[in-house]
Amino acid sequence: MQKEFAFFPGCVLTQAAIEAKMSIEAIAPILGITLKEINGWSCCGASQAQDVDPLATLVANARNLALAEKMNLPVLTTCSTCLLMLRRAKAQLDNGQKERINTFLAKGNMNYQGTSEVTSLLWLLAQNVEEIKAKVKKPLSNLKVAVFYGCHSVRPEKDLGFESSVNPTSFETVVKALGAQVVPFEKRLDCCGFHAVYPAEKSVMKMTSGIVNSAAKSEAHCVVTPCPLCQMQLDIYQADAQDTTKSKARVPILHLSQLVGLALGIPAKKLGLDYNVIDTSKLG
Amino acid sequence: MTEQFTRREFLQSACITMGALMVGTGGLEKAYAASSTTTSDTKMPSCDVLIIGSGGAGLRAAVNAMKKNPKLSVVVVSKTMPSRSATTMAEGGINGVVDFSKGDSYELHAYDTVKGGDFLVDQDSSIKFCKAAGEAINELDYLGMPFSRTKEGKVKARPFGGASKVRCNFSADKTGHIVAHTCLNDAISSGVKFLMDHELLDIGVDNGRCEGAVLRNIRTGDIAPVRAKSVIIATGGYTRIFWNRTSTPYISTGDGVAAALRAGVAFKDPEMVQFHPTGVVHGGTLITEAARGEGGYLLNNQGERFMKKYAPSKMELGPRDIVARAIETEIREGRAFGQGLEAYVLLDVRHLGKEKIIKDLPQIRHVGKLFENIDLVDQPMIIRPTAHYSMGGIDVAKFDDMSTPIPGLFSAGEASCVSIHGANRLGGNSLSDAVVTGKIAGEGAAAYASKADFSAGKRLHDLAFQWNSRFKEVTSNSGDAKAMYAIREELGAQNWDNMGIFRTQAKLTSLSSGLEELQARYKTLRIPNPNPVYNTAFTEYVELGNLLLLSQAACLAASERKESRGAHTREDFLKRDDANFLKHSMVTMNESGKLQIGWRDVEITQFKVEERKY
Amino acid sequence: MKFIIERFDGKKSYEQTYTVEKKDIEALTLLSVLLLIKQTQDVTLNFTASCRCAICGACGVRVNGHAYIACDSKMTELFEEYKDTDTFRIAPLANFKVISDLVVDWEPAMENLRKIKPALVAKSEFSVKEGCRQNQEEFDRIIKQWDCILCGVCASECNKLSADNSDYMEPFVFTHAWRAANDSRSKDPMIHVKPSVTNGLWNCVHCQECANRCPKHISSADDIASLRALAMRKGLNSGVGPAHAKSFYTDLVEDSGRLNEIRLALRTEGVSTALRAGTAITLMGAGKMNPLEIFGGHTIEGHKDLVKMIEAAHAANKE
Ligand SMILES: Cc1cc2nc3c(=O)[nH]c(=O)nc-3n(C[C@H](O)[C@H](O)[C@H](O)COP(=O)(O)OP(=O)(O)OC[C@H]3O[C@@H](n4cnc5c(N)ncnc54)[C@H](O)[C@@H]3O)c2cc1C
Ligand code: SF4
Ligand code: SF4
Ligand code: FES
């Protein structure tokens, strides 16, 4: 397995999803992965900034990629939206935009070449299930997990391309490798609504609630997602969302890295499980 | 009427005086049961101009009828959602002279059209048509159609079969799709009202005047008469008589032509069906002429560009009938690949280069992959002819307003025959036909409706009653659907084998009795689905009835036309016979439902009738 | 091999299972399979199709919960996509009213198209008689969106429409607005942009389903993003949506270079919005957010350079 990565945490890992950062940093050494945070990385635009200024967004991401290239390392991120934005930028740059954008990067003495690939924690784990299996200390055999992919880890397939977007399997494979049971979960490919929580609040709350209820219906002990934005949406807004639809169900929402951490035997506190808004104490 | 039209609003308000007839399922039937013989004209929905069909022709008709007289209520009826037409399928291009700098002119376009049609074209219509076609190109551009462009930013044209100058304007290889959506956008923005999922069953003609049409609301199953001051039939062609051996969509079942024939209008030149040389071997879908226009080669099993034997100067760009016959001859004489129905020749575009194929022929490349697993970039496509276009159609008496001989009844597009295409249509002329004749018919029908009153609708009422009874009679919980599909398959095969590219008296005689036998079987068909809601089996049943009728008309005219002309090749009469057949065949239906043939002289104005050589 | 088809006869919904031999359908398209079932097993099964070659848009259906156009879907590809399956579940497009079996109602979608005035209104220098002028580059810019065949696949998958269609439109409607607004021949893009804004432009949830499933590889999501940018450039920038998008941008360019959740909430909805303030408090309560961040977090290393780069890009773009 590729061991060293230029780590792109993404904005939320520094603040609202600090526990994602804690847990990924906790599991990495055990899995033999070295994460070197990219110095001076900027926001990827979060699939929003392009609504204001697509060019600036592309420039910012070209710079992010160029920073990783300087480190001579492939990029790894755990946020699916960052993954999409970076991969898209890379595709645009590699398909004809490189020269033009490089003239702008030159203003800060930077240059994009196209040497660093962009991958995600989920993909990395899926490519190395056997190694993970070998490292599992506490198989999660009693844990029923609803896996929630989140849009930008599979869609659009042409930008992500790791696996089928209508029938993906990477996440199930990883969760099963941790010893957990994957429950059938109708909404595993739905959208959590995060990106429109402000403008389309009513709809988004309905979507969030639908996902939580679907997980509850399949009797999952928790929902796990590789994307910190989905995690935030389903976790932080869960109470509000359930209130708007008058539903009682509450389901803990875990980051993929937290679930991995549990199976590796890392204490809950180190994984930041106490930062999760919906109580996770029964899981750890 | 508000801008936002819904079907319910049409039924409730635009229909002027609707009463309880169409509200709710079953209402109609009950109403008919109660008043089976008496006509109460206040109970019939109506509108001023009723347009049947939403291809290029129907949509242009609607917008222009509204423009002509904004006070009129104009409604477009379509048996599908409006954009599912044959128009969307056209790929190659749309003819019209816009560039006069290289010696092209409307007259030259008209001459090519007349010659291409083997002089069966009405020359007065053709010259008017070509002028209007040139104007239509700029109009489409103005309406927002994205044409491919020249360096000067003008509409781009490509060479096309049978044309002496470059005047086939295009938009990549999706020209028809782009035309259709340009027309649809315009219709939507202009506030045209649609009655989608409604099917024309019959046209009411009483006292020699068109009263309106009988429509079936496919969604509910309600069959109702709709009165209209004028009706435009723009239902497209009838090439589905060859069922699976055609490039046209499933909707091309000639419903409007059949209804007009039953209503007393002549079916003109029904035997004139164009075979496109390059159809996909499995399924008949089209590989457009653009493939040859852009420089593709036709090769036989010796690797030879065999068109040099048949059209030495034009080669692959010879007119369709000549190219189609050439391919069939190669197949018959053993210089093709495959056997029997699976026989084929090759269409090779590889030498054009990957970039050009991807840029200019993407749709064709896609079809190759979908149906034959062939990527045209790497491999030649396997092809053979397929039925493609109906030159014949509803007899239109006057190009200037596209009126039929029956007052109030108009026709446009492929359903009509005025006759621009004669015995063989030039590639690229039918999209222009659809938009040009559609517009003229819209204006003509609006002008007529502005002066006319509604008629009583007695015949309409009777026809609707008959159709309601027919639905009840034909559909039930028992019956055999397979029998219906068997008839349809056999119809296609028999027409193809006997009335295909090469015809003889013996073949046509045997087809005639074959068709009678199929008709007899059709009469006893029962459809095992009594549900009125979106009963597509009943739609197929109605369409099959139309196809049978139209096949009989075509067969009659094909056996009577004892000459070879354009697409009509009689192996027992290989020569064109201007002395006896410089005439349109006119098939009509008499009182007892029997088909009869008559003839009408071709209009000859400025172009001398001569041998057609390329 | 089983095909479970979701059926509706006008009154009741039910499922029906049809069994076919795998070898009989392997070489077919999904449309051919449906035709086969109708013609040999059950003539009451209803669906629509017209062109059979992916251009008329009539044959959209869902397979195992995802939308496809049936005529353009080869069974071999579906077998590959849904590994090991011996059962396919066929359903009508979602987010449309079902009329019968796989047939859906297009009327509301057509009415939405009406709202954005899909036809071009040409600049006054052009005329019906002379047509327009457009260079190849301007043509290339819009032609992708002209591939839309109104198949409804994007609408079927749209998460926003599924949640609530009362303040939104089918993704292809925005694509139609985009292509009219971005046509170099267009007199005024706002003819199409304004009704887009008032009919939900800012409500897209970025789920990317439309872009992912469109058989013509159109990304309505991108068109929506682009229409938003256009709307803002043209001054249609009031409201929650524009403020939300803008705050990401502000953080990226004007402030620290990174996103600040609390500022995001404040910028988007203003200080007084109880729910969002509540969210921020939830975040702080869970110990996730440093309340001091509200006064501006740490600026990223090299932010000045980033700003320079973006300024250079803007300058170049203006030329
Ligand atoms: C594959 C293909 C490629 C082609 N390429 C070219 C080309 O390159 N250049 C060119 O000029 N021409 C081409 N053509 C021909 C051209 O597309 C058609 O001739 C033309 O578009 C016909 O237009 P229309 O409006 O008359 O009919 P259509 O587009 O067929 O529309 C008919 C309409 O009538 C409706 N309808 C039918 N029956 C009923 C009924 N009973 N009740 C209610 N509504 C009904 C249908 O739903 C449809 O909306 C091509 C055709 C095909 C099939
Ligand atoms: S990205 Fe937006 S428009 Fe596209 S499917 Fe998702 S919510 Fe709908
Ligand atoms: S945008 Fe794509 S998926 Fe949506 S209707 Fe158009 S062609 Fe179909
Ligand atoms: S049948 Fe026309 S798109 Fe499938």
Image (cartoon, coloured by chain):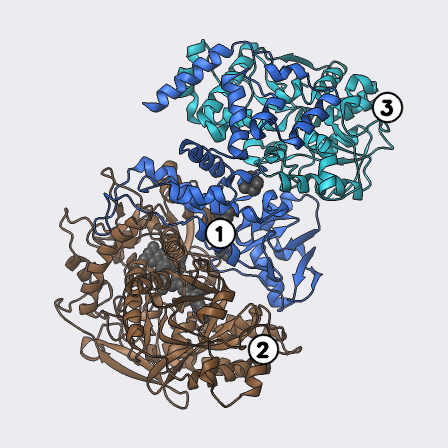
Chain colours: A cyan, B brown, C blue
Q: How far apart are marks 1 and 3 (CA)?
A: 55 Å
Q: Which residue lies furthest to the front in this view?
A: C272
**Which residue is denoted by mark 2 in the rendering?**
B27
Secondary-structure class at tag 1: helix
Residue A28 as seen in the image, left or right of residue B148: right
Going 35% across and 45% down the picture, which residue do you hit?
B172
Q: Do the residues labelled 1 and 3 touch (CB within 8 Å)?
A: no
CB of mark 3 within 8 Å of CB of mark 2?
no
Q: Mark 3 points at which residue?
A: A138
In the displayed structure image, the side of residue B423 where residue A110 appears, left or right: right
Kindly report the distance in space between the C-alpha atoms of the residues bearing marks 1 and 2. 30 Å
- The label shown at residue B599 is none
Have a look at marks 1 and 2 and say if they share a chain: no
Amino acid type of the residue that numbered disc 1 sits on in the rendered structure: Asn
Visible residue check, residue C171 = yes
Q: Are marks 3 and 2 on the same chain?
A: no
Report if residue B493 is visible in the image.
no
Q: Amino acid type of disc 3?
A: Lys
The one nearer the camera, C276 or B232, is C276
Q: Name the residue under label 1.
A: C112
Real-space Cα separation, disc 3 to disc 2, in angstroms: 69 Å
Q: In which quarter of the image is the C terminus of chain A?
A: top right
Q: In this view, does A85 lie to the left or right of B233?
A: right
Image mark 1: chain: C
**For the residues carrying marks 3 and 2, which lies nearer the camera in this image?**
2
* Camera-nearest residue between B588 and B460: B460
Of the 4 image quadrants, the one containing the N terminus of chain A is: top right
Q: In this view, does C257 lie above or below B439?
A: above
Residue B257, horizontal then vertical, whole percent: 38, 74
